[in-house]
Amino acid sequence: MAQAKLTIDLDALCANWRSLDALSQTETAAVVKADAYGLGADRVAPALAGAGARTFFVALAEEGAKLRRILGPGPEICVLGGHMRGDIAAIREARLIPMINSIDQMLCHVEGLPGHPFGIQLDSGMNRLGMEPAEWSALRDIALAQKPFLVMSHLACADEPDHAMNRRQLDAFRAMTDGIDAPRSLSATGGILLGDHYHFDMTRPGIGLYGGRPFAEARHVVTLRIPVIQTREVQTGETVGYGNTWTAERPTRVATIAAGYADGIHRAMGPQAYVGIGDAPAKILGRISMDLIAVDLTGIEGTPDSVELLGPHQGVDTLADWAGTIGYEVLTNLGPRYARHYIGG
């Protein structure tokens, strides 16, 4: 194996979508922004469409235009960033549905694409995207008269089921939308797991599709195997890697493997991280460098051709914990140098 190999299990991905779909009585969409969380929208989105997803969410109109070329004319494609100036041609030609986030975006949409479908995003307390209650009150009747495709909001703390913010946002969203004649959506993966009060007419799972928290029952989707380039015997008192940050306290057999932070492997996780050799963990030694990582093979029988950084024994959230980040960042940072291999789907 000449380069690290990233394997994406499309059957597991689709099984995760079906499992999340089964948790509600509503339509279940799929979030495929950031190139399907780094795993390749050209393969992920058609697999999800085959599993039954009929509505997809992206962040930007450019992503939506690319996704339309991938999926063809059937599915609906919603743009969470809304209608930005300069997006008129892309939205029209790809038949995208912008989620309008402000009065300015509404004016831009009505002037640039009169009669074109749109949705509304409301701010229920996250203070990120969406119309605040006063804006919505001013625009509500006009917007609803034009039959929006969807009225949505986004939960800030759904990964923490007992967080008081969840109920506050649910109450705020209901106060802004109860009684309207338009489909509603509040929940991504975490919100789906909060129960049916949060489901409304559509759910929008993202990270749970790809095997990440908070969907604990998710099937494993991503495996990353990294080839071993070289092994050596390091003697007591010798050091490994930049900065002499690791010193051998005993004779140690060290492997150098062919990946590093240029491949999206977080440098910060080095002191805590392991790779897998079969069922056995092997400690990463010293600093993770741009293209290379040192691994302790002491006690491992033989010399493996490759080691596993991501896999059934340690998923994206394990790596994220080691690096002090989140599984989303681990996935979206997976670099372009991997040999990508898709199975299933």
Image: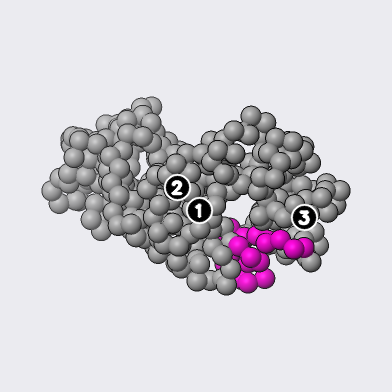
Q: Quadrant of residue 13?
A: bottom left
Residue at 51% x, 45% y: name it: 33
Q: Nearer the viewer, residue 56 or 286?
A: 56
Q: As shown in the figure, which amino acid type bears the numbered disc 1?
A: Pro
Q: CA distance from mark 1 to mark 2?
A: 8 Å
Residue at 54% x, 41% y: name it: 94
Q: Quadrant of residue 243?
A: top left
Q: Are marks 1 and 2 in contact (CB under 8 Å)?
A: yes
Name the residue carrying label 3: 144
Residue 75, labelled with which disc? 1
Mark 1 burial class by Cα count in 10 Å: few <14, some 14-19, many 20+: some
The answer to whether residue 105 of the structure is visible from this angle is no
Q: CA distance from mark 3 to mark 2?
A: 29 Å
The image quadrant where one finds the N terminus is top left
Identify the magenta region. 180-202
Q: As shown in the figure, which amino acid type bears the numbered disc 2?
A: Gly
Q: Say if 1 sits above or below 211 in the image.
A: above
Q: Is residue 266 left or right of residue 114?
A: left
Q: CA distance from mark 3 to mark 1?
A: 23 Å
